[in-house]
Image: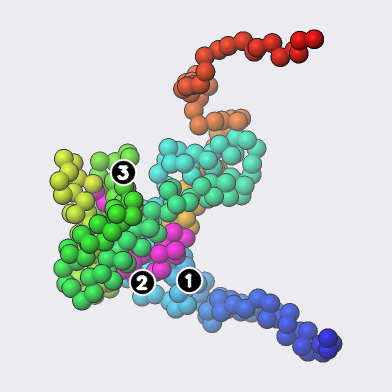
Amino acid sequence: MTAKTPEERLTEVSDWWTTGIIDIHPGRIAMRGYPIEELIGNVRFPEMVWLLLRGELPERAQSELLEAAMVASVDHGPHAPSISVSRMAVTCGLPVNGAMASAINVLDDIHGGPGQQCMELYREIAVEAGDEADPARAVDAVLARWRTAGTKFFPGFGHRFHPLDPRTPRLFALVDAAQGAGVVSGQFARIGRGVEAALAKGKARPVPMNIDGVSAVIYSELGFEPELGRGIFILARAVGILAHAWEQKQQGGRIKGPMPPSIPYRYNGAARRAVPDRRRST
């Protein structure tokens, strides 16, 4: 093997990590080409999220819509597993960073993932619809495919706690306003409403869109990839996770489980019984 020159070694080390996100040199920091000192005080946090993920600064109206979806997603109380995990972790002795990591790790396909899955559903409908102005046919076709594939609960619709998710109408009003101002096209808003209408057919009670469904509308309208939709939700929910971990730290408490000791869990195993004689006979 030919020995590498010092210059080749330096190039190899420099190329080990390659990024277009941040450029750092002594006394200089730039994000996507923008000097950090110019971003500070001029760019809001949602705009910074957009810049790092997409490479360019958004229009202010775009960042306001992104911010609205993030604000709506920050918390849903201790009955949300991610929040309860953060609080339980603190009572087990974990510091705030450990509690946050534990909580974020439960934001997987069922709790945390439906927003991404809903974006994938909307995208499939958009592809199916093509140039059709009315997505109704495409909605029915894609829902039928998902049902054939075994889907029973459609991500982004229905809520175990809210008959009507109070976040949805407000966010939809902002989407409609953004569409009227030419900020978004409204394509995914039409698709989302079409799915909601289709799921209500033949049902005694409607299956209303929840925060995941309306956030999926917003992130899709703004052009984010589905996997980034999940990441942005986790970024927003991390605020609530931190707040609850810190509140629990102030309240104290030790080894708090999911329910108080006075409320027993349900045991459905064998009745109490004696251990048989295990001694060998001689």
Query: Callout 1, which amino acid?
Result: Leu
Residue 41 vertical position relative to residue 151 in the rendered view, above or below: below
Is 127 positioned to the left or the right of 78 in the image? left
User: Mark 2 or 3 closer to N-term?
Assistant: 3
Q: From this viewpoint, is residue 43 visible?
A: no
Assess disc 2: are there few (<14), some (14-19) or many (≥20) residues with their C-alpha within 10 Å of its C-alpha: few
Of residues 142 and 252, which is closer to you in this image? 142
Report which residue position mark 3 lands on: 159
Please name which of the two marks, 3 or 1, marks the residue nearer to the observer. 3
Instruction: Compute the Cα span from label 2 to label 3.
Output: 26 Å
Assess disc 3: are there few (<14), some (14-19) or many (≥20) residues with their C-alpha within 10 Å of its C-alpha: some
Q: Start and end of the magenta stretch?
A: 208-232
Instruction: Compute the Cα span from label 1 to label 2.
Output: 11 Å
Check disc 2 and report its element: helix, strand or loop.
loop
User: Mark 1 or 2 closer to N-term?
Assistant: 1
Quadrant location of the N terminus in the rendered image = bottom right
Are discs 3 and 1 less than 8 Å apart at CB?
no
What type of secondary structure mainly makes up the magenta span? helix
Q: Is residue 233 magenta?
A: no
Assess disc 1: are there few (<14), some (14-19) or many (≥20) residues with their C-alpha within 10 Å of its C-alpha: some
Report which residue position mark 1 lands on: 53
Check disc 3 and report its element: helix, strand or loop.
loop
Residue 199 lies, in percent from the top left, at: 21, 51
Report which residue position mark 2 lands on: 223
